[in-house]
Amino acid sequence: MSHRLDSQRFRRAEGRLDKCPRCGKGPLAEDVDSGELFCTNCGFVAKERVEETGPERRTFTEDGKEDNARTGSPASIASHDMGLATVIGRSNRDAAGSQLSGGMRSTVERMRTWDRRSQVTDSVDRNLRRAFDQLRMFAEKLAVSQEVIERAAYIYRKALDRELLRGRSIIQITAAALYAACRDMEVPRTLKDVASVSNVDKRDVARSYRLLLKEIGLKMPVPDPVKSLSRVASKAGMNERTRRKAFEILMKAQKKGIVAGKDPMGLAAAALYVASTLDGGEKTQKDVAEAAEVTEVTVRNRYKGLRQTLGI
């Protein structure tokens, strides 16, 4: 029995057995289609099934090179089971690739159903599953990164451990955890944005957010108005020159120490309005206030404060 080892179907079995256990001569080769490990000299089948050690799916490193690590989906704290549970696939084919019969398909479908049910065994798992489904939906609408989702999931789990959800809505605490994660990681998303995508009243989200801060002991960084600058400028339709001048104004204001305790969106809007007036722009206080989702009074007060303090 002879085979061409350089073909697509057969390949040399490196790293398993050097010689045939029967004749002791020929090297072993692997049949990619059937998974058999056989001798190229006498044809003896050493193994009928060989465990695949290659990658299950194509993954790539940061520099664009293919990663050959044998891995599945990464573990995530934003899954109720940490992403460690097994899942029965949707393919109705057996190990040899043949189509399953009607009776076997019905049996496998029942197995899938019980597999899904077995993953949620108590009220805590059901709570986490519902909360994290809502969290992913809110995060997708807000276009935030996976790191923010993971942080929000961590905060929600802490709230569940402290029994803060008794008598409170899961959606409210989820929205509050997402807002807390955005604040903690300095992602420019306002309370109004989170309340809008979660369809929860802004006051309820704010109340739940304050509860999380008090009971879990979260320490939030001071909001940076510079991070809100690009967002407001894009909504208001301002050019790059105005943005750069507004950035310089905010940096001077930070050195003077006049940004602490003030709404970052209001300060960003005021800095953009100051820069626009210096460049002879046509944007009004109303235009900038609507882009920043603050009142015209806020923009006017912050505008006066910046001009007086910086001597513009």
Image (tube, rainbow, N blue to C red):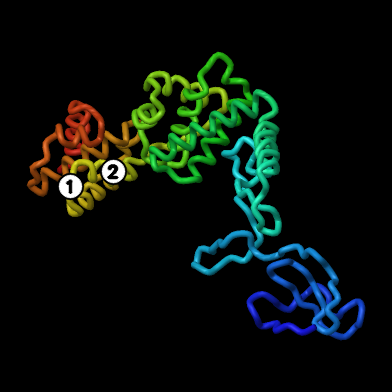
The one of 189 and 303 positioned closer to us in this rendering:
189
Q: Residue furthest top?
A: 167
Mark 2 is surrounded, within 10 Å at the Cα level, by few (under 14), some (14 to 19) or many (20 or more) other residues, namely some
Quadrant occupied by the N terminus:
bottom right
The one of 289 and 55 positioned closer to us in this rendering:
55
Identify residue type, mark 1: Met
Side of 59 relative to 180 (left or right): right
- Evaluate if marks 2 and 1 touch, with contact meaning CB atoms under 8 Å apart: no
Instruction: Give percent across and percent down for residue 208.
Output: 47, 22
Mark drawn on residue 238:
1
The one of 272 and 144 positioned closer to us in this rendering:
144
Side of 96 relative to 184 (left or right): right
* Residue 239 visible somewhere in the drawing: yes
Instruction: Give percent across and percent down for residue 230.
Output: 28, 46
Side of 271 relative to 34 (left or right): left
* Residue 84 visible somewhere in the drawing: no
Instruction: Give percent across and percent down for residue 159.
Output: 58, 26
Identify residue type, mark 2: Arg
Q: Looking at the picture, does residue 45 appear above or below residue 279?
A: below
Residue marked by disc 2: 231
Q: Considering the numbered disc 1 on the image, is that residue within a helix, a strand or a loop?
A: loop
Instruction: Give percent across and percent down for residue 199.
Output: 38, 25
Q: Looking at the picture, does residue 36 appear above or below residue 305?
A: below
Quadrant occupied by the C terminus:
top left
Which badge, 2 or 1, comes first in the chain's sequence? Answer: 2
Mark 1 is surrounded, within 10 Å at the Cα level, by few (under 14), some (14 to 19) or many (20 or more) other residues, namely some
Q: Considering the numbered disc 2 on the image, is that residue within a helix, a strand or a loop?
A: helix
